[in-house]
Image: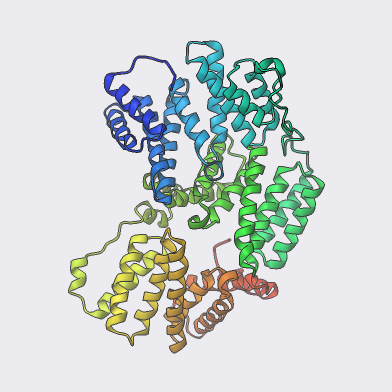
């Protein structure tokens, strides 16, 4: 790095040298730099530059890590530190250099930090124009080129071309002239120093930037679009298809409208989710995330577009798509905008964004950040579920005590932990699986132990970062539960387990929603005969889920009939 600022201390300079070696590819230097900067920052929390270097080094740790989940976790942790340092000392040139380069080098599809890189590079260019001693001319030239590259990747072609043309007046270095030529920038003959042109290339495609200026839309048309999307989000295959056709037409008629493009992308993903064609499940999701990224890049301040992308990224399985970092960035942006203007969302949407952000933090193993969200939500709503989520891995479990239990007591403990696992406690799910597996082997004729073991096996698969375990354990677990329920079809607990497992399996892979309908109807009829078999609120939940299951398999009339019967029976307006 060619930045020249205040003379650092000897230990700080040594840590910076290790960091810079890490940037160049020395993997052994990176953890050493991390330890040194972490120590400096912990000893002096006001040393914001140490915090920034720690953030950059942490991101480098992620770059070098073999485990994909750890790569993401470390990259996100590094970005958090860099953002924190900038917020505390936004005019510090070296801090902005560090954050700009980390954001520029992260994969945009997953992290979406090129906008931050542009902000930092523009700041650095402005600093150099005011004071040419702030860093070297060579570093200034590199920053201008990277600024143009960031614009280009964001689809801001005109701005990229304008920046790169200015670069022609700053350098005659063949390295940059060749790179500009490869980007389609015409290099005048007199600049090359040779007797011929380096090549004009095809020229940078200008055209109209997608969504640079949104066409004004009537409130009626926008309301119609929102309603079509809302129906698709909670509707049947037919309603998804109708919404998709609506937005396909809207995009054809107004290709520059990023909001319609984003709605279309989200409906495309929904169509894949409800399709019987497995290839469409993944193919449509990938097309949708690419189009949503384009829509956000074209209009990054549009609240609705950012919310659409955030929710789409949130609902995609992290094991396959790695979009939690994208969801995190969008949700944090939306909450920041809400702080500035509390009219952009209603309170329900605002609370929902915070809850989803907490879930994303947990997926990314950002436990401290997740805990702060749950604490805030509990203070705002008073709901007890957030108290549990503040410490989701903490459980009351005594392994020594279990050793003195008989098999029935172990089974009950396993069921208790299984239920905690269903509520989101990964540790409880792992312990439940071990206990229930032991009981089911010791008592092979006990169908309850067998079924709960199958359910806990599926749970551990769901929580696994390995897609093979996710599907493999899910299929094995469901088979065990299904067989147990078939052997004792009048057992309420077995029908509850099977019904909800079938309900939660992806329909386009497993086609088990019909079985969930069968089990839910059995539970409803049993409750009507004896209302003491389970709580009234659980009965209402089963009613609602039966309607959702009907809707999923295209029986919209039955769904509406079930939901109509639910109205007036519950105090919950949702």
Specify the quadrant that holds the N terminus: top left
Residue 314 versus residue 34: which sits nearer the camera? 34
Residue 334 versus residue 383: which sits nearer the camera? 334
Residue 35 higher or lower than 527, as above or below: above
Using the rendered image of the protein, determine whether residue 564 is visible from the camera's viewpoint: no
Circle count: 0
Counting from the top left corner in percent of width and height, residue 352 is at 53, 51
Say which quarter of the image contains residue 571: bottom right
Residue at the outermost front position: 195
Residue at the outermost right position: 253
Counting from the top left corner in percent of width and height, residue 110 is at 53, 45
Q: Is residue 218 left or right of residue 372?
A: right
Counting from the top left corner in percent of width and height, residue 535 is at 45, 74
Name the residue at 56% across, 13% down: 129
Say which quarter of the image contains residue 144: top right
Residue 314 versus residue 64: which sits nearer the camera? 64
Name the residue at 57% across, 78% down: 517
Using the rendered image of the protein, determine whether residue 354 is visible from the camera's viewpoint: yes
């Amino acid at each position: 790095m060619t930045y020249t600022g205040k003379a650092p201390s000897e230990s700080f300079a040594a840590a910076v040298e290790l960091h810079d070696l890490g940037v160049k590819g020395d993997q052994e230097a990176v953890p050493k730099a991390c330890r040194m900067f972490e120590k400096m920052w912990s000893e002096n929390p006001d040393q914001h530059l140490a915090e920034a270097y720690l953030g950059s080094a942490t991101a480098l740790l992620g770059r070098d890590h073999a485990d994909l989940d750890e790569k993401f976790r470390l990259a996100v942790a590094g970005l958090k530190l860099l953002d924190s340092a900038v917020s505390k000392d936004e005019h510090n040139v070296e801090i902005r250099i560090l954050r700009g380069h980390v954001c520029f080098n992260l994969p945009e599809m997953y992290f979406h930090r090129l906008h931050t890189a542009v902000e930092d590079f523009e700041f650095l260019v402005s600093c150099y124009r005011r004071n040419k001693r702030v860093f070297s001319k060579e570093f200034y030239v590199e920053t201008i080129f990277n600024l143009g590259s960031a614009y280009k990747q964001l689809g801001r072609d005109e701005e990229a071309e304008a920046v790169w043309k200015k670069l022609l007046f700053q350098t005659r270095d063949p390295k940059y002239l060749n790179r500009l030529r490869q980007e389609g920038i015409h290099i005048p003959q007199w600049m090359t120093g040779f007797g011929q042109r380096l090549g004009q290339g095809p020229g940078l495609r200008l055209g109209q930037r997608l969504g640079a200026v949104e066409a004004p839309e009537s409130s009626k048309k926008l309301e119609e679009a929102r309603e079509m999307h809302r129906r698709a989000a909670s509707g049947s295959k037919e309603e998804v298809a109708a919404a998709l056709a609506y937005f396909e037409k809207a995009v054809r008629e107004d290709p520059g409208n990023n909001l319609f493009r984003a709605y279309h992308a989200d409906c495309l993903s929904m169509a894949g989710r409800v399709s019987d064609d497995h290839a469409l499940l993944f193919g449509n999701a990938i097309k949708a995330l690419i189009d949503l990224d384009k829509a956000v890049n074209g209009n990054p301040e549009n609240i609705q577009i950012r919310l659409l992308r955030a929710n789409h990224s949130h609902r995609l399985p992290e094991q396959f798509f790695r979009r939690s970092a994208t969801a995190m960035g969008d949700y944090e942006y939306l909450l920041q905008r809400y702080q500035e203007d509390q009219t952009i969302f209603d309170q329900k949407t605002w609370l929902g964004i915070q809850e989803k952000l907490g879930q994303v933090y947990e997926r990314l193993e950002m436990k401290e950040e997740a805990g702060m969200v749950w604490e805030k939500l509990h203070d705002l709503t008073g709901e007890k579920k957030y108290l549990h989520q503040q410490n989701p891995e903490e459980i009351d479990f005594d392994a020594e005590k279990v050793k003195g239990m008989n098999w029935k007591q172990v089974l009950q403990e396993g069921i208790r932990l299984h239920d905690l696992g269903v509520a989101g406690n990964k540790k409880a799910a792992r312990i439940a699986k071990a206990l229930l597996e032991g009981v089911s082997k010791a008592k092979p004729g006990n169908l309850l132990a067998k079924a709960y073991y199958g359910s806990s096996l599926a749970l551990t698969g769901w929580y696994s970062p390995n897609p093979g375990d996710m599907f493999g354990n899910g299929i094995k677990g469901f088979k065990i539960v299904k067989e147990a329920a078939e052997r004792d079809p009048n057992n309420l607990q077995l029908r509850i387990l099977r019904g909800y497992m079938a309900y939660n399996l992806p329909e386009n892979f497993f086609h088990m929603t019909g079985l969930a309908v069968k089990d839910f109807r059995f539970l409803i009829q049993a409750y009507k005969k004896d209302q003491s078999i389970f709580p009234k609120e659980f009965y209402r939940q089963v009613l609602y889920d039966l309607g959702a299951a009907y809707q999923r398999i295209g029986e919209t009339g039955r769904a509406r009939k079930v939901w109509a019967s639910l109205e007036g029976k519950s105090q919950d307006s949702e």
